Amino acid sequence: MATFGFSILKDRQIDYDNNDHRLFRFIEEQEPSIRLCIGCGGCTAGCTAAGFTGFNYRKLNYLLMRGETEHLQKGIQQCMLCGKCKLVCPRGVNTRNMIFALKRAFKTPLWEELQKKINV
Amino acid sequence: MTNIKKIAVLGGGVAGMETSIQLNRLGYQVDLIEIEDKLGGHVRNWYKLFPDHKPADEFLEKLISNLSATDVQIKTSIQINAFLRKEKKLCLFDQACEFGVYDAVVVATGFDLFEAYRKEEYGFGIYKNVITSAGLETMFLGKTIKTSGGNVPKRVGLVHCVGSRDEKCGNLHCSKVCCITAVKQAITLRQMLPNTEVFCFYMDMRMFGPSYEELYREAQEKWAVRFIRGRISEAAQNADETILIKTEDTLTGRQLKMNVDLLVLMVGMLPSKGTTVIGKKTGLDFGMNRFLKVKDEHYHANETNQEGIFVAGSASAPMNISDTISHARAAATAVDHYLKTTDHERFSEKNNIRNLEKALHEK
Ligand SMILES: Cc1cc2nc3c(=O)[nH]c(=O)nc-3n(C[C@H](O)[C@H](O)[C@H](O)COP(=O)(O)OP(=O)(O)OC[C@H]3O[C@@H](n4cnc5c(N)ncnc54)[C@H](O)[C@@H]3O)c2cc1C
Ligand code: SF4
Ligand code: SF4
Ligand code: SF4
């Protein structure tokens, strides 16, 4: 196929209206404290995983809350569940349980459905 | 016997002094009772005041000279230990003796600073170069800002929200004045030490008062104060006694570490010990933030759940000086209104009296 020096770029905006918010609701129900996050970054400041990989708990929390589910599964593989983030958090977000809840979610039919959507 | 009504104002800080002045101008006989040997409260320890950099002592002198122009009775070094209701009056006890009988009492016993050593991860009381915002004011007053090694700090970090907005120390509230205090102190640092870099580590910049946002802008524009949005997770001392701090620079999404020569903790405001003790002894309600609870946040911001007992200033919530002055003046108006209404109106809320009697009996 002939190239014309440009390609069709994927839209980088968070398409809030079209995003699927069911995963957030699922996690929120199991760990309601995730809504309390004020994005201070205390969790990420001391996180060993964040020091050596691109993983960032604060961003993970916000991506989930915005319905951006694409990178979550890969992201949490870096987390060692050490719980340092939970010790720091001024809002009492149960960070570790949020990650456990995500892990549980990845085994549900909802996740399979979301995966299909992402891969279209 | 005179029929001039007598009022006790507890606490001789900004709030107590201003309430006393206004009540006296309205024609009441006022006893201003301060636990310490001097008037002025916390402001006595500050160097310059935001937002206009007015010297704090100049402000206090003005307030004290206004007070001297009245015939308010100033009683320092007095600790009130007990309260008793005698018919419609309140009887105050100093040690075991009756100190005085009053028609109304205004509680203006202010705030205490958060004890910074409780946030152990910041190392106050462990590392020599970690100080508090109050400690920095003391350095300003002494006109020498030095590290533990006696050197001029080349870099200073100011940490916002220490002991506020932090459920780990049980304080959910925002102390309101520490953001603007940080801006004020950062500017003073840059003025006194032009070759020193100054960084503020904040979660939100709460510039709530007139010309505060402009001062924040001035800090950036004129004084090149650097602002980094991220909560400091920990501080550690290096071999040379400088301090290594860690945060997430949330606006770039990357971890950030930095060495500073001096770390200043912007400690929050809590109700003072006096506020708590007097509140308990008189059966006052406390809010979620443990400050004294007012009857209505909008319309009865000086009235309490107890007849004849009013609150002024930072005993009711964290406040800057201008809000404290307004609150104090409003307290005087509220007391005046209370004393001028008829007995029937005054004692219509019988439950309140019963509550007080119950509280007094439980003591
Ligand atoms: C670091 C820092 C810097 C600040 N800088 C500024 C600034 O630049 N500009 C500004 O507008 N605001 C500033 N503030 C806020 C300011 O300090 C307060 O607004 C002000 O002190 C409130 O006055 P107050 O009278 O309510 O309380 P306080 O100042 O706390 O006074 C209370 C008084 O009551 C007395 N007392 C306590 N218990 C008893 C008792 N049992 N019996 C009798 N007396 C008692 C105390 O000894 C004290 O004298 C700053 C605050 C901090 C923490
Ligand atoms: S539990 Fe995971 S996210 Fe939290 S600090 Fe440890 S590695 Fe980082
Ligand atoms: S420490 Fe808590 S409040 Fe701060 S960003 Fe992390 S989860 Fe959110
Ligand atoms: S005023 Fe600023 S520093 Fe103080 S508690 Fe509120 S947000 Fe934190």
Image (tube, rainbow, N blue to C red):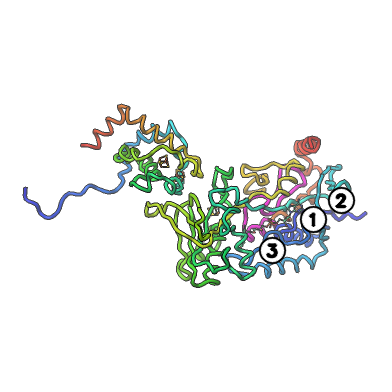
> What stretch of residues is rendered in magenta?
B301-329
Chain letter behind tag 3: B
The circle drawn on residue B44 is: 3
> What amino acid type is highlighted by mark number 2?
Phe
How much space separates mark 1 and mark 2, taking CA atoms?
Answer: 10 Å
Mark 2: few/some/many CA within 10 Å (<14, 14-19, 20+): some
Q: Is mark 1 within 8 Å of ligand 1?
A: yes
- Residue on which disc 2 sits: B99
Q: Are marks 1 and 2 in contact (CB under 8 Å)?
A: yes
Q: Position of residue B64 (x, y in %)?
A: 75, 66
B273 left or right of A57 in image: right
Labels 3 and 2 in the same subunit = yes
In primary-sequence order, the first of circles 1 and 3 is 1
> What amino acid type is highlighted by mark number 3?
Arg
In primary-sequence order, the first of circles 3 and 2 is 3
Q: Position of residue B362 (x, y in %)?
A: 78, 35
The circle drawn on residue B33 is: 1
Circle 1 — which element? strand
Front of the two marks 1 and 3: 3
B334 or A29, nearer to the observer: A29
B252 left or right of B3 in image: left
A5 part of magenta stretch:
no
Q: Are marks 3 and 2 in contact (CB under 8 Å)?
A: no
How much space separates mark 1 and mark 3, taking CA atoms?
Answer: 17 Å
Residue at point 64%, 53% (across, down): B113
Quarter of the image holding residue A73?
A: top left
In primary-sequence order, the first of circles 1 and 2 is 1
How much space separates mark 3 and mark 2, taking CA atoms?
Answer: 27 Å
